[in-house]
Image: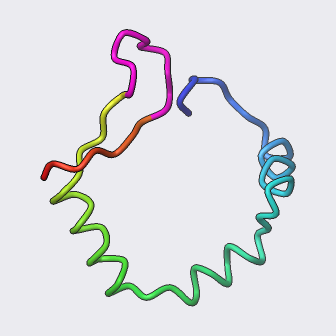
Amino acid sequence: MAHDQPISTPALYRNLGDLGITYKRLKRIAAERDDGFRADWLHNMTANYTAEHPWPQQRDCPRQLFHSQE
């Protein structure tokens, strides 16, 4: 919760549905995922990128960008 605001379960499902994301789709994607590929991706992201707020002066901005450390 980036804004520390609670959201009801029905509201969450409506928001996900508006984006075309359903429980059935998420379940299928999770069942088909490649755990080895995911582990490699996660290792690459944590080794080569850091999360930063794009506008440090705006503390309430919930967005974060990944910047390469190269």
- Residue beneath the point at 73% across and 34% down: 7
Relative to residue 13, is residue 28 depicted above or below? below
Image position, residue 41 (x, y; %): 31, 72
Q: Is residue 30 left or right of residue 48?
A: right
Q: Quadrant of residue 30?
A: bottom right
Relative to residue 20, is residue 2 depicted above or below? above
- Residue beneath the point at 34% across and 17% down: 56
**Residue at the far top in the pictured view:** 57
In magenta, the rendered stretch is 54-63
Q: Is residue 51 left or right of residue 32?
A: left
Q: Quadrant of residue 36?
A: bottom left
Q: Does the stretch in magenta take in 20?
A: no
Image position, residue 45 (x, y; %): 27, 61
Q: Quadrant of residue 48?
A: bottom left
Image position, residue 14 (x, y; %): 87, 49
Q: Is residue 65 left or right of residue 47?
A: right
Relative to residue 60, is residue 38 depicted above or below? below
Quadrant containing the N terminus is: top right
